[in-house]
Image (spheres, rainbow, N blue to C red):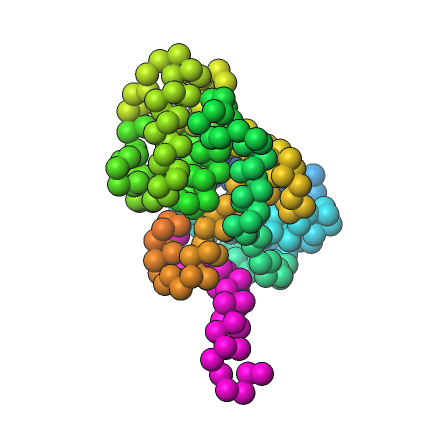
Amino acid sequence: MAQRVESLLNRFAEGREEFLASLSLQRDLSSNTLRAYGKDLDIFLQWLEDEDIVVDMESLQRLPGQYTQFLQGQSLAKSSISRKLSALKMFFRFLLKEQYFALGELSLQFQGPKQLKKLPEFLTVEELSRMKQAILGQKSWKSLDSIALRNLMMLEFLFSSGVRVAELVHVKVGDVLLPEGEIRVFGKGRKERISFISQETLGYLQYFLDNGFVELKGATPTAEDTIFINYKGNSMTTRSVHRLLCQIASDAGLKKKISPHTFRHSFATHLLNHGVNLRVVQELLGHVSIRTTQIYTHVTTERLKAAYLKAHPRAQ
């Protein structure tokens, strides 16, 4: 029996709120991630309403394919299309589980675009040095003003720890064990792990907490204060970190497209290039699945090739 799209929209709209509430409770996702899921679902619901179609059991099962065609016509990146379809697939599964639809009524056959494997960009040690020099100029690091010192510390912190930018801006003074160089990090889903920073970063951090932090915040740091603050003494945002890194890279004359994630890619790539086990890198990055970490094996080919050329009698 055919039903107009309004009845579908009602069921989808009701399920949307419960779905997002379920994600927030069960997965403990960040507010940004939940907003992204909600926006992806809203685009689908708006498309469904604009189409004003009449659906029956057979045509309902064709909705994912029709929606995929719609997305492909929106000049979106393949990764964006795949993410939106992934959100919709999870949503449909939830609707079936909670019996908004009968079993078999919603098809889960999604044909997303095939994505080319894109190798992650990473910074060389020389490029990082150029970025640091762009901050230092002709000064020693102890003679930098508070903001410049914070910027220098941020570069080294990202490069030596491999933390996500969302993790960086939430690191508190009490999360760092200064003598050991260990940092307590809360990753996706508030999962806790231990990361590490270099001795050089520790020096910057200790000096910043003793001097620059007090100047910017107007108070002595406490365990609950976030470390990375702006000139007003407030916590930095992920966007402000991104903009700042782009500006430093531009000042250093780098042609690469730089983001906070570039430093995370760099961290993983340099570890693997120096023979660190993939499972160890997985733990340090906080990846749930080893498959997520395996993308970095593609950029370690240079190390393998060098070893082959050096050792094999027929390599030349």
Would you place residue 199 above or below residue 282 in this image?
above
Horizontal side of 77 relative to 286 (left or right) equals right
Spot occupied by residue 228 in the image (x, y as percentages of width and height): 43, 27
Would you place residue 188 above or below residue 284 in this image?
above
Spot occupied by residue 169 in the image (x, y as percentages of width and height): 43, 31
- Which residue sits at x=49%, y=30%? 140
Horizontal side of 221 relative to 257 (left or right) equals left
* Quadrant of res 222: top left
Horizontal side of 34 relative to 242 (left or right) equals left
- Which residue sits at x=36%, y=24%? 209
* 293 magenta-colored: yes
Would you place residue 31 above or below residue 53 in this image?
above
* Quadrant of res 120: bottom right
Q: Which residue extends farthest bottom?
A: 314
Spot occupied by residue 65 in the image (x, y as percentages of width and height): 63, 56
Task: Give the magenta range.
Answer: 287-316
